[in-house]
Image (spheres, rainbow, N blue to C red):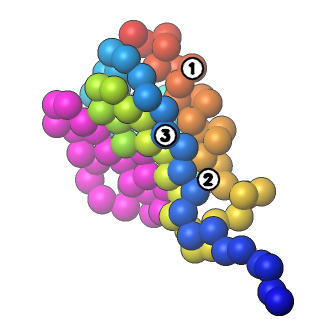
Amino acid sequence: MDTAVQIDVFGLVFLVEGNTPGILNPDFLLAREIVERGWGWEPADPPISVPPLARVTYDSRVTLLATTDRLDFKDQKVPVSLDATRVPGIAQRYLEAAREVV
């Protein structure tokens, strides 16, 4: 019996109070080194920023979504390698930067 598991989506969700979705944009993510220039990631589509949400999706298939009460960080590379996904580090750096901005 084959017990191999393929992970198609890896995500982290945080429930937050008083979040400011408008800070989520590619420039903020680069300026705060949440997403690093050396990764070569480019937005896959134009970022969305309309109250009360903002979304950035990269060509690497990583998506960040912010609302006033929730933050979603998702890696949709198939298969997702838990050793290689950058989502945990992105989430940590974003949470630290967002705390400084508010």
Label 3 or label 1, whichever lies nearer to me, is 3
In this image, 27 relative to 60: left or right?
left
Name the one closer to the observer, 61 or 3.
Answer: 3
According to the picture, the residue beneath numbered tag 2 turns out to be: 39
Q: Distance between the residues labelled 2 and 1?
A: 20 Å
Q: In this view, does 59 lie above or below 71?
A: below
Q: How far apart are marks 3 and 1 (CA)?
A: 15 Å
Q: Which residue is drawn at 71% across and 64% down?
A: 81
- Whichever of labels 2 and 3 marks the residue nearer the N terminus, that label is 3
- Whichever of labels 2 and 1 marks the residue nearer the N terminus, that label is 2
Going by the numbered disc 2, the residue's amino acid type is Trp
According to the picture, the residue beneath numbered tag 1 turns out to be: 96
**Quarter of the picture holding the N terminus:** bottom right
Q: In this view, does 91 lie above or below 39?
A: above
Q: Which residue is drawn at 50% across and 52% down?
A: 74
Mark 3 burial class by Cα count in 10 Å: few <14, some 14-19, many 20+: few
Regarding mark 3 in the picture, which secondary structure is present there? strand
Q: Which residue is drawn at 61% across and 30% down?
A: 92
Going by the numbered disc 3, the residue's amino acid type is Val
Q: Residue at x 39, y 54 (%)?
A: 57
Name the one closer to the observer, 9 or 36.
Answer: 9
In this image, 67 relative to 102: left or right?
left
According to the picture, the residue beneath numbered tag 3 turns out to be: 13
In this image, 47 relative to 82: left or right?
left
- Residue 53 is inside the magenta segment: yes
Regarding mark 1 in the picture, which secondary structure is present there? helix
